[in-house]
Amino acid sequence: MFKSLIDFRFNSFITVKLSSVFYAILMIGVALFAALSILAGLASLVNGNAGDGILTIIFGPLVALIVLVIIRLWFEQAIALILIAENTKK
């Protein structure tokens, strides 16, 4: 992989190799956001803000799921473009 980093002609792409690592990191971040939004919703319920708590518990993980889908689509698009470039180069 180090050869790919110093390849100034861009004959080999590292995006395909590193995308799974970056996706896993982003997935952990989104999961932490979802968990923290649930905890914030529960804290709101305990403090007497039932409406805010329920909305946070419902929409926090929903937003996290939508963000995860967008991230996945972005990675798939990037990888597809690179694979097309590699196939047309042959």
Image (cartoon, grey):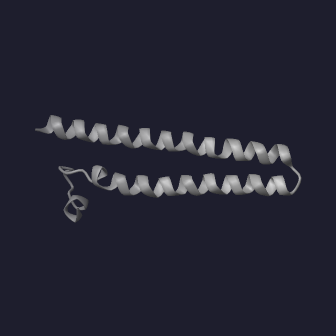
Q: Quadrant of the C terminus?
A: top left
Tell me what residue is drawn at x 69 percent, y 42 percent.
58
State left or right for residue 66 relative to residue 85: right
**Number of marks in the rendered image:** 0
Residue drawn where x is 86% and y is 49% of the image = 49
Residue furthest to the left: 90
Residue in the picture at 75% in, 52% down = 41
Q: Quadrant of residue 21?
A: bottom left
* Residue found at the far bottom of this picture: 2
Where residue 44 sits, quadrant-wise, is: bottom right
Report whether 47 appears left or right of 65. right
Picture coordinates of residue 32, whole percent (x, y) = 58, 57
Q: Position of residue 30 (x, y in %)?
A: 55, 52
Instruction: Say whether residue 11 is left or right of residue 49.
Output: left
Rendered-image quadrant of the N terminus: bottom left
Image coordinates for residue 34, horizontal then vertical, percent? 62, 51
Q: Is residue 81 above or below residue 18?
A: above
- Residue sitting nearer the eye, 20 or 51: 51
